[in-house]
Image: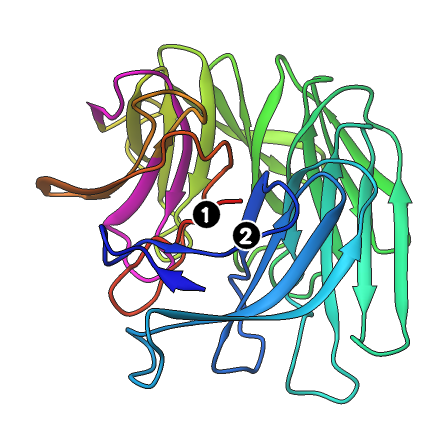
């Protein structure tokens, strides 16, 4: 892996497969390095990543592959389990993927002899997002163009199905209250559900559409952010169901919104992959300036990785 000389915060990983999705693990895996997975047409590659900003002995960035998992079909979404640990014996790697065949796949490996894959069927259209319950990792939630949000256990059983009013684009779990789930719909509505009663307890309205992505601020859960059209919008859910802040983000449609996991005022947005002016923008509430990296032609969803200097790591094929 080498540093791109034109941008000190942009690094490249040579890949044998196309890259469609990249996710850093947001959980402590017991290693000084960060866990990273990227998915392509046939494989999911899992490895550890260290940046020069985290370790002075690293030149640019250091990526070590732990394992390449055969996937067989294009990877469209990926989520890490909080149960993933590298400091235990045996080690455990667990993640879930969504693919174009409308299936979820749960991968569990000890990086030695144990390797299990469970397929979960139920969605009848494209799956847009999948996430693990963040405290114990015993459940997963997924949203789809089939107008449903579904909750699954680790055995692959569907335990909850929530009927939506439009395609589901994002789903987030409350970081501490395991029965609260946030679901964002393409028509511009975000709803919070009680999984015990399976009823909506709160809703937010963008006032426009299409809503492409939403995220719950885990360092301050009264904040919710999203991209709708070409704008980013922010809510304080204790004050109003309508956004408190709204600003243009991209010339074309925006694609992704991600909060920093280290700073409640920091977030990133991306434009739609493949657009000439597609960019990754890093925003700070209260400061009009943004840091930006061009990602034109990458054709992948770029994750938001929080290191000391809030670097956005961009991986291309």
| Horizontal relation, residue 263 to residue 144: left or right | left
Towards the viewer: 289 or 52: 52
Residue 237 shows up from this direction? no
Q: Would you say residue 267 sits in the magenta stretch?
A: yes
Residue 47 marker: none
Residue at 47% from the left image edge and 82% from the top image edge: 32
Residue at horizontal 32 percent and vertical 53 percent from the top: 10
Residue 45 placement: quadrant: bottom right
Q: Where 241 falls versus 207 (above or below)?
A: below
Task: Classify 91 as above or below 227.
Answer: below
The answer to which image quadrant residue 176 occupies is: bottom right
The image's mark for residue 23 is 2
In the visual, does 248 lie left or right of 122? left
As for residue 305 lying within the magenta part, the answer is: no
Place of residue 249 in the rendered image (x, y in percent of width and height, measured from the top left): 25, 26
Mark 1, residues whose alpha carbon is within 10 Å: few (<14), some, or many (≥20)? many
Label at residue 303: 1
Task: Work out whether mark 2 precedes mark 1 in sequence or the reverse, and give the earlier one.
Answer: 2
Residue 293 visible: yes
Magenta segment range?
A: 246-269
Q: Position of residue 35 (x, y in %)?
A: 56, 67
In this rendering, would 291 be left or right of 135?
left
- Which residue appears at 33% of the width and 86% of the height? 57
Q: How many other residues sit within 10 Å of disc 2, few (<14), some (14-19) or many (≥20)?
A: many
Location of residue 83 by image quarter = bottom right
Is the residue under label 1 in contact with that under label 2 (CB below 8 Å)?
yes
CA–CA distance between discs 2 and 1? 6 Å
Q: Tell me the element at label 1.
A: loop
Residue located 65% across and 62% down the image: 46
Q: Secondary structure at mark 2?
A: strand
């Amino acid at each position: 892996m080498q540093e791109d000389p034109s941008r000190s915060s942009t690094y490249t990983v040579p890949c044998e497969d196309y890259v469609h999705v990249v996710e850093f693990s947001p959980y402590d895996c017991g290693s000084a390095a960060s866990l990273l997975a990227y998915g392509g047409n046939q494989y999911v590659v899992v490895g550890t990543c260290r940046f020069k900003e985290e370790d002075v002995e690293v030149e640019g960035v250091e990526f070590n592959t732990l394992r390449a998992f055969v996937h067989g079909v294009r990877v469209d979404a990926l989520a890490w389990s909080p149960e993933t640990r590298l400091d235990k014996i045996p080690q455990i790697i667990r993640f879930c993927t969504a693919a174009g065949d409308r299936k979820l796949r749960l991968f569990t490996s000890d990086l030695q002899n144990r390797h299990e894959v469970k397929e979960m069927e139920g969605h009848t259209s494209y799956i847009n997002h999948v996430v693990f319950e963040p405290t114990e990792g015993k459940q997963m939630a997924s949203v789809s163009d089939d107008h449903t949000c579904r909750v699954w256990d680790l055995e692959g059983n569907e335990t909850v199905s929530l009927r939506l009013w439009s395609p589901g684009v994002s789903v987030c779990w409350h970081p501490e209250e395991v029965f609260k789930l946030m679901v964002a719909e393409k028509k511009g509505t975000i709803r919070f559900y009680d999984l015990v009663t399976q009823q909506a307890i709160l809703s937010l309205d963008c006032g426009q559409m299409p809503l492409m992505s939403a995220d719950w601020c885990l360092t301050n859960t009264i904040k919710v952010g999203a991209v709708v059209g070409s704008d980013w919008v922010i809510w304080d859910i204790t004050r109003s169901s309508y956004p408190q802040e709204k600003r243009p983000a991209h010339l074309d449609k925006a694609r992704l919104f991600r909060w920093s996991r280290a700073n409640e005022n920091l977030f990133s947005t991306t434009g739609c992959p493949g657009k000439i002016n597609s960019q990754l923008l890093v925003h700070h509430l209260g400061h009009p300036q943004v840091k930006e990296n061009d990602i034109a032609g990458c054709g992948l969803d770029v994750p938001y990785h929080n290191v000391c200097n809030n670097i956005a790591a961009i991986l291309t094929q």
